[in-house]
Image: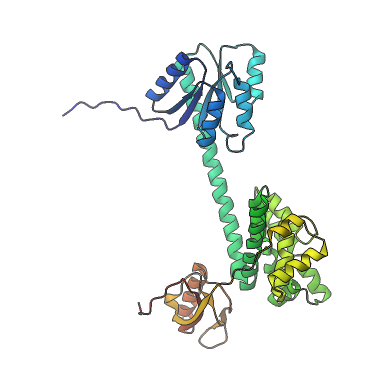
Amino acid sequence: MPPVTEQRSPHHGNIMIVDDNPANLKLLEDMLSQQGYEVRAFPRGRLALAAADQEPPDLILLDINMPEMNGYEVCEQLKSSARLSDVPVIFLSALTAIEDKVKGFRSGGVDYISKPFQFEEAQARVETHLKLRRAQRAERDLLERTLGGAVEALWELVHLTSPVLALRSHAIRDMVLWITKRTGLVDSWQYELAATLCLLGCIALPDDVFERGYRGEDLSPDEDRMFHAHPETAARLLSNIPRLEAVAEIIRSQQKPGATPLHLALELDRRIYRGDASGAALSGLRLSHRFDGRMLDALEGYSPTVAEFEVRRIPIRRLRAGMVIENDVLSNDGKLLILKAGTVLTDIWIERLENFAGARGAQELVGVRIPKLAVVSEHPE
């Protein structure tokens, strides 16, 4: 039996070293590479900044005294970059005065190793900060997945509550994306989320109240109060979700005149929903002088996406997500409405229909509108 050899498990981490001293650079590069790190070495700060922007490292070891640009300046530029600001920087320097160390921390460094250094100490600090970065990334990824799940659940709630709300939300989101892409608006993701969920508060409204209110038709005082309260309802739901506070505020202010793409998109969609052509609706908004000219210009050429469908009657077992219910789906006795006409099918809606069919009976063939690109087999399964 061959002898068992001890194998060192590689450390995962992409490390950048910046030092104008070739001997120091080579020594650190060799030592860290032997420990399993992926290492990139640079003798100048500008070269390192360009390379980091191309491929952000997990950690940077940065000398202070360098020509052209010292370590403090390199670190400050890193921290001013949205792409690189969270990369940890450990300073390497023969400067040992307390004011030098304080300056390093103020410029954005997370640690400071004095030269000459013991490699064991440098490696221990490197691994400590890499572990911290991995933990921060894991926490951020978890938060983003949680946030994404919360938004998806809220959107699904809109979708399940009313086909009309879902269709209008889609249209508003498309307009907002059209505006933000053409104007280069900062934090466009916030406006995209706000547009997606801006009608969330309408799930509390009867369908007819929403439709009449959205078209601008007459409402009773109580109905008018309900309709105009929906932005506050949605904002209240979202304000309890971390990182959505700004989105909640955009939604809360959606009915107030101002230079926001959401307000413009809502007004344009309401006119289109009333039956105006998109070009005529946009011209009317321009004549009102209530909206930002750049955003109005961005919408020139916009027209709502018109999907092409074919109408089919197919068995429940062959329904697929994305199909649209053509007529109300009722129970066999005709007394129970299971799905409304206009509902865009999702996996949840299909499961609901299958459950009703199994437990209480439902019509065997369902009339649906199928997008032209969708393919439904003609042969029974």
In the rendered image, the vertical position of residue 55 relative to residue 185, given as above or below = above
In the rendered image, the vertical position of residue 124 relative to residue 373, given as above or below = above
Picture quadrant where residue 199 is located: bottom right
Residue 256 lies, in percent from the top left, at 80, 59
Residue beneath the point at 51% across and 70% down: 322
Residue beneath the point at 55% across and 37% down: 136
One can see residue 361 in this view = no
Residue 361 lies, in percent from the top left, at 48, 83
In the rendered image, the vertical position of residue 330 relative to residue 374, given as above or below = below
One can see residue 254 in this view = yes
Picture quadrant where residue 210 is located: bottom right
Work out which quarter of the rendered image holds the C terminus and state it. Answer: bottom left
Tell which of 316 and 282 is nearer to you.
Answer: 282
Q: Give left or right: position of 106 versus 15.
A: right
Q: How many marks?
A: 0
Work out which quarter of the rendered image holds the N terminus and state it. Answer: top left
Residue 283 lies, in percent from the top left, at 76, 67
Q: Residue furthest left?
A: 1
Tell which of 324 and 175 is nearer to you.
Answer: 175
